[in-house]
Image (cartoon, grey):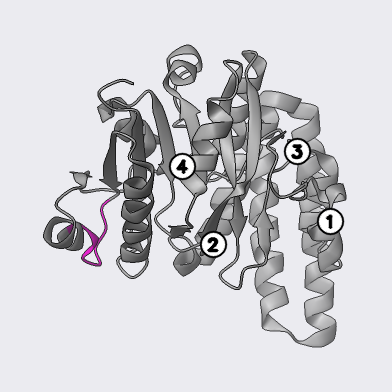
Amino acid sequence: MSACDLSVVIVSWNVRELLPACLESLAAELERNALPSEVIIVDNGSTDGTVELVRERYPWVRLIALGENRGFSAANNIGIAASHGRAVLLLNPDTEILPGAIHWLWHALDAAPHVGLVGARLLNPDGSLQSAGYRFPGYVQNLLDFFPVHRRLIGSRLNGRYGPGDGLSPFAIDHPLGACMLVRREVVERVGGLDEGYFYYSEEIDWCRRIRAAGWTILTAPAALVVHHAGGSTRRVSARSFLELHRSRARYFRRWHGPAFVRRLALLASLAARWAALRARLTGRQELAERARLLREAATIYRQAVRGDESA
């Protein structure tokens, strides 16, 4: 064993209410596993007392207070650069680690030298499945996002979702949700950190695509259970989050699928905006009018990406 086997990096932004449950569940799990470890929180300029909470109640955490919101990718890269473990666990602050999760993540990562990154099985607070992993996104996923249909399709394999398998055996996926990812130090040294061109959203997809391209296997460990209170940091700014999501997607799809693919997404977003606007006029529902407005802005983002106005 090295002096530090596991580094846990948590990026926080205005999550004072959720962070204690994350840190307390993490501390209990680290004690159970007895892995030489360190915990680093990189705070992206929180204004809700998150920094003060960590300093007062969790002195065992190494805190890096940036004083401004540098974005999820940049903050994670800062935490990774400051860490020393031979593996790094990137963990969202709106998660709770259930007993055994780190053991199963570590076991899957250590199973073979070609395994580069492992994700957990994420649960909703009610215990239902949130995510076991995803296929890399394509046209169908965007179609279902722009034109929401039955929830069973949204959560299906058609939309790129993996099921939990037998609930125990790790299996290969394209990428996990970025809320909980255990990655080898060697992988980071080989492919680099997260692309800081993504402010938030899609950064883990791009990273996993680079990791897979470098020859590593990505797994999910379905026995590693983590509760994810999804959107703990971003739900307060939902309109901005929607546009940041599509700005990140435009960057991702231009890089991995090319301008022609992004041009089709711009057209699809425009059609979805017209459909939402028509439904708003027919029903008088204000939320549909707002969705139409946001979809028009998303279409503009994709058109800018085609022209190269957005970095890609």
Q: Secondary structure at mark 3?
A: loop
Q: Which residue is mark 3?
A: 135
The secondary element bearing badge 1 is classed as helix
Residue type at mark 1 is Leu
Dot 1, crowdedness within 10 Å: few (<14), some or many (≥20)?
some
- First in residue order: circle 4 vs circle 2: 4
Q: Is residue 239 visible?
A: yes
Q: Please indicate whether residue 63 sits to the left or right of residue 21 in the image.
A: left
* Horizontal relation, residue 153 to residue 83: left or right: right
**Marks 4 and 1, Cα distance to the nearest angstrom?**
27 Å
Residue position for label 2: 230
Q: Residue at x 81, y 86 (%)?
A: 283
Q: CA distance from mark 3 to mark 1?
A: 25 Å
Amino acid residing under circle 4: Phe
Q: Is residue 214 above or below residue 49?
A: above
Residue 49 colored magenta? yes
Percent position (x, y) of residue 11? 35, 47
Q: Which residue is mark 4?
A: 199
Name the image quarter holding the C terminus. Answer: top right
Do the residues under discs 4 and 1 have CB atoms within 8 angstroms? Answer: no
Between circles 4 and 1, the one closer to the viewer is 4
Q: Secondary structure at mark 2?
A: loop
Name the magenta segment's main secondary structure: loop
Q: Which residues are magenta?
A: 45-51
In percent of the image, x 72 and y 75: which residue is there? Answer: 288
Q: Quadrant of the N terminus?
A: top left
Q: Are marks 4 and 2 in contact (CB under 8 Å)?
A: no
Q: Residue at x 44, y 51 (%)?
A: 92
Judged from the image, the secondary structure of the residue bearing numbered disc 4 is loop
- Mark 4 or mark 3, which is nearer the start of the sequence? 3
Looking at marks 3 and 1 on the same chain, the residue that comes earlier in the sequence is marked by 3
